[in-house]
Image (tube, rainbow, N blue to C red):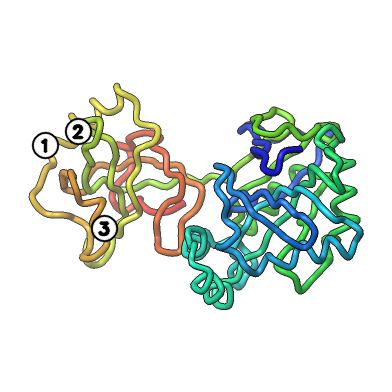
Amino acid sequence: MPPVLAPMLATGGDLPVDPDWAYELKWDGVRAIAVVTGRRVRLYARSGAEITTAYPELAGLGAALNDQGITDAVLDGEVVQLDREGRPDFIALAERMHVRDPARARALAATIPVHYMIFDIVAANGTDITRASYVERRELLESILPASDAGTPWMVPPRFTDGEATLAAAKELALEGVVAKRLTSPYRPGVRSPDWIKVKNEQTGDYLVGGWHTGRRRLSGLLVGMPGPAGLIYRGRVGSGISVATEQDLLARLAPLRVDTSPFAPNQVPREDTVATTWVRPELVVEVRYGSITRDGRLRFPRFVRVRPDKSIEETGDA
């Protein structure tokens, strides 16, 4: 087993409903491989870059494993920052993830603490267990780090047998979605495998276009928002989902609406989104699919769906 491995990845798809699968909640954070050697813990991002310094509160994980008879291990999981309701807060986590100064990392750990959601173990006590089944790996993981272990900044999140109920719970709790895992599946480092299927909770909303951004294409993104008392409330820039044909159609619809000033409320649009932007009268309604809305009011993972000529300004807004 190499000291660092590329994590196994899930494919997107429909939820498999079958007794041969287990279901885990999908955590919105930073994927991290933990390499434990004795009491030392080193963390690596999906890219392979070391991120240990950013999360000093996870240093005690090595000692916790040693106490269970595990002298070395390779773990897979997600570093998350949880809000008061116990939901992942990616915006808050963003303040932590690029910190490389130890003193600043320690200060942030006291005010914006993280949790390490450990969902797999792929090596233990010098043995490579990637060929073991998902069930065998999870049973080992749960035996050394019980899911009920409270008071630590790491935990083994639960797995479930009812996929539809798990997905419904994820939606109710406003979580990102569910990952279904085949019970017999080995761990395949660096492979996007059909043995793991991610099912994201997505929503759609109808928004007004307030401008378009020009980048590598004449229209590389739409600036969208919803009506507010002082102008449009900015929801973000939407670039995904716009084909060449759609780009031409949007330009034809938007060109007659050009204006010289932004239709968005003051201080709504970040400076970087005003560069190479053409403003328009907010009359065109578009449907946008997205994962969630961030704490600062931006759409996460927005994707253009279609123009909605059947929708009025009064019908626009979040799902």
Is 32 in front, or is 304?
32
Whole-Å distance between the Cαs marked 2 and 1? 7 Å
Instruction: Examine the rendered structure and indicate whether residue 252 appears above or below residue 319.
Output: above
Q: Which residue is mark 1?
A: 256
Q: Do the numbered discs 1 and 3 sit on residues whose CB atoms are within 8 Å?
A: no
| Residue kind at label 1, given as amino acid type | Pro
Secondary structure state at the residue bearing disc 3: loop
User: Where is residue 134 drawn, in percent x and y?
Assistant: 83, 39
Query: Does residue 149 lie above or below 160 as drawn?
Result: below
> Which percent across, then down, holds residue 275?
19, 48
Could you classify mark 2 by the number of other residues whose Cα lies within 10 Å: few (under 14), some (14-19), or many (20 or more)?
Answer: few
Q: Which mark is residue 253?
A: 2
265 or 192: nearer the eye? 192
Q: Residues within 10 Å of mark 1 (few under 14, many from 20)?
A: few
Q: Which residue shows up at 68% across the image and 29% down it?
A: 193
Residue that numbered label 3 is attached to:
269
277 or 32: which is nearer to us? 32
Residue sticking out furthest to the top: 245
